[in-house]
Amino acid sequence: MTVRLRPEIAAVPPYQQGRPAPQGGYKLSSNENPFPPLPAVVEAVQREAEHVNRYPRPGAPQLRAALAEELGVDAERVLIGDGSATLIQQLIHAVAGPGDEVVYAWRSFDAYPLFVRTGGATPVEVPVDAEHRHDLDAMAAAITERTRAVIVCSPNNPTGTIVTADELDAFIARVPADVLIMLDEAYIEFVREPTANGIELQRQHANLVVLRTFSKAHGLAGLRVGYAVGDPAVLRGADLCGVPLSQTSLASTAAIAALEHVGETFARIDVLADQRDALWQRLVDAGVPVPKPFGNFFWIPSRPGQEDAIHDILDANRIVAKVFTDGTRVSVGEPEADEHILAAAIAIQAIQ
């Protein structure tokens, strides 16, 4: 006799992490920053490594204070987590359980259904529109008395599209005040055009929580550190759903160092954004219907049943990307990979 798992757990497909690249290939499957950590970050981590025999301070108070100053908010409105995805899971588990619903766009971050189902709640997936953008009107219409939370991802992972300020204002106005709104801004630093200001909106709406991370733009994916900005009562509930002392001292120290040298980080972001925009234009000129990207990745639409053929195309071009049933997400990586991305995208379009 085997141990009986909860039915919703047994039915959840596991999250598929991006595969590593083969020798001589390019790993473009996890939206990682191709730049190495800043020297100041490496030095700070090396110093802190001498003290890893001790537990970190609960709640990473020094990082909370640094972020509060950077964002212009009170420290009690900041919650540190081991990645923004973990904080989203904690928030979902804090507000939703069996019989409750969580609304989000689809396709969006493929960990959302896992987070919802492991908490016992029911995911409500609202299809993105023909331009691969959130259909916020349809999402608002999908809210019922059972809805406990909604998630808006901007830029949307994996389609790369954003939500405008006016669109988000109108959407928030339609969401009941007792329903949690999570604004997932994991890629916000890469956006160069006007979009919703999540931190400013949070000051106006107690049911809004903004999620951000140091994994992408700041290049700290291997250390797992993210943060939430929201109402202190909501954040306390999320904190109770997390593992005590899960924010490591190495991660917090690295994040503080990154904030102290944020100008260097944004100089790198400009380089990546220039590379992204130039490659996107080449893709469009080649006839590949890639939606305009606002993160550090591209979305190449496809049809179900083509996954094996797409993997073969990617392998032939020495690229590892994340292939879904309806498209492929390719990260912006080393400049040397751009020609391979272009060739692969043209080949994928040819089989449509």
Image (cartoon, helix red, strand yellow):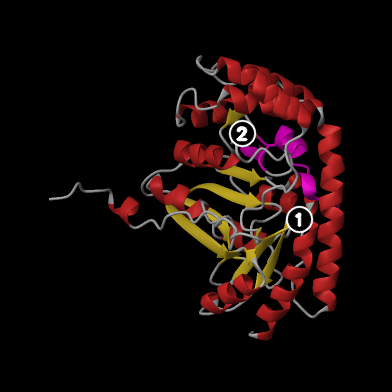
Residue ID at (56%, 72%): 311
Disc 2 crowd rating (10 Å Cα; few below 14, some 14-19, many 20+) is many
- Magenta segment includes 201: yes
Question: Which residue corresponds to mark 1?
Answer: 334
User: What stretch of residues is rendered in magenta?
Assistant: 189-215
Question: Which residue corresponds to mark 2?
Answer: 225
Dot 2 falls on a residue whose secondary structure is loop
Disc 1 crowd rating (10 Å Cα; few below 14, some 14-19, many 20+) is some
Q: Mark 1 or mark 2, which is nearer to you?
A: 1
- Magenta segment includes 94: no
Residue ID at (56%, 63%): 126
- Looking at marks 1 and 2 on the same chain, the residue that comes earlier in the sequence is marked by 2
Give the image quarter of residue 37: top right
Between the C-alphas of marks 1 and 2, the distance is: 24 Å
Dot 1 falls on a residue whose secondary structure is loop
198 displayed left or right of 61: right
Q: Is residue 351 above or below residue 86?
A: below
Residue ID at (73%, 60%): 161
Q: Residue furthest left?
A: 1
Residue ID at (67%, 56%): 156
Along the viewing direction, whichever of 212 and 238 lies nearer the viewer: 212
Residue 304 location (% of width, % of height): 53, 77
Q: Is residue 14 above or below residue 97?
A: below
Q: Amino acid at mark 2?
A: Val
82 displayed left or right of 34: left
Number of marks in the rendered image:
2
210 displayed left or right of 116: right
Residue 309 location (% of width, % of height): 56, 79
